[in-house]
Amino acid sequence: MRKISSIILALVVGVILWYFVLKPQDYQVNFKAKAIPGTIFESVKAWNQGFDSVIPLDYESPRHFRQTILVNDSLQVFEWEIQKVHDSLSEVQVNITDLDYSFNNRLGVPFSDTDFEKGSRRLLLDFNDFLNDHIQLFTVSIEGEEEIFSSFCACIPLTTTTEGKALGMMKNHNFLNGILLQNQVQLNGPPFVQVVDWDLKNNRLSYNFCNPIIRSEKLPDHPDIVYKRIFSQNAIKAIYHGNYITSDRAWFALLDYAEEKNIPVERTPIEVFYNNPNMGGNELEWTTEVFMPIKESDE
């Protein structure tokens, strides 16, 4: 009898130790979201900017990252785990820990619906509304494999945040066009972006903003402009409709497609823009062709 009591006591102590010390979260929320992991990650980044005190996300991957939020007088960590179900649905698990009142929260959670639980659910419902509004503003369709165009071009190298890409384009569009037209350089197609480095962890994007041109012997020499040739290459292609600020949603869709089809790709997309944002209009009618280059075989 004494042995049984000792075993029961050890089990109780073990459960208490696990719950208050080893359990990785104070509270867990699970929900389904009508988007792929990359879109959810970028939406959390944008939603995070709406808090009074903005703390950058701690990135591991678009499927796993941590968000720290100042709620009243405490810091709360939201650890996001996202699993794609299909092209328009993901399962989201958020593990929430209050860095200042963790013990009190764990003590109260089993016995009542605490303010901590209610507040956590309220925040995530707000995010889900934010996400649902966002996904109405763009569409992405995968077209399959296609060759990237070949062209000689004039480019301006830029480095911005991912969401700052469109602003970088707008700031340099008239400048680049003006220099080329002033020197009677003939344009040879719509403008495009060639990504050089997509650094998700540090939210930095290095890219060339380019105009295809007809090569000549009288190209203007300017310190901000470089000339280069884009060579034809196999790629996976998507069509994106929406504001150019969020065209990277197509990048994530292409990466998911490549992973599912076991296609090795280079994370250096090329985007071709067919509408001028300065002219306004319905953003859902703005068209972007997006190419994710396929890695060339070593054979």
Image (cartoon, rainbow, N blue to C red):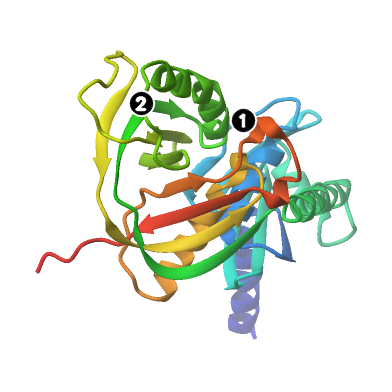
Q: Which mark is residue 55?
A: 1
Above or below, comparing residue 243 to residue 213 in the picture: below
| Label 1: which secondary element | loop
Where is residue 6? Give x, y as percent: 60, 75
Residue type for callout 2: Val
| Residue 53 seen in render | yes
**x and y, in percent, of residue 76 in the image:** 69, 40
Which residue does the image show at 33% across and 70% down from the upper left? 263
Q: Check whether the beta carbons of the residues at disc 1 and disc 2 lie within 8 A of each other.
A: no
Give the Cα separation between the discs numbered 1 and 2: 46 Å
Question: 244 left or right of 212?
Answer: right
Q: Count of labels shown? A: 2
Residue under numbered circle 2: 185
Q: For this view, does 205 lie left or right of residue 264?
A: right
| Category of crowding for the residue at label 1, using alpha-carbon neighbours closer than 10 angstroms: few (below 14), some (14–19), many (at least 20) | few
Q: Quadrant of the N terminus?
A: bottom right
> Residue at position x 48%, y 36% from top?
203
Q: Is residue 93 above or below residue 208?
A: below
Q: Amino acid at mark 1?
A: Ile
> Quick check: 124 left or right of 250?
right
Q: Is residue 22 visible?
A: no
Horizontal side of 270 relative to 243 (left or right) equals left
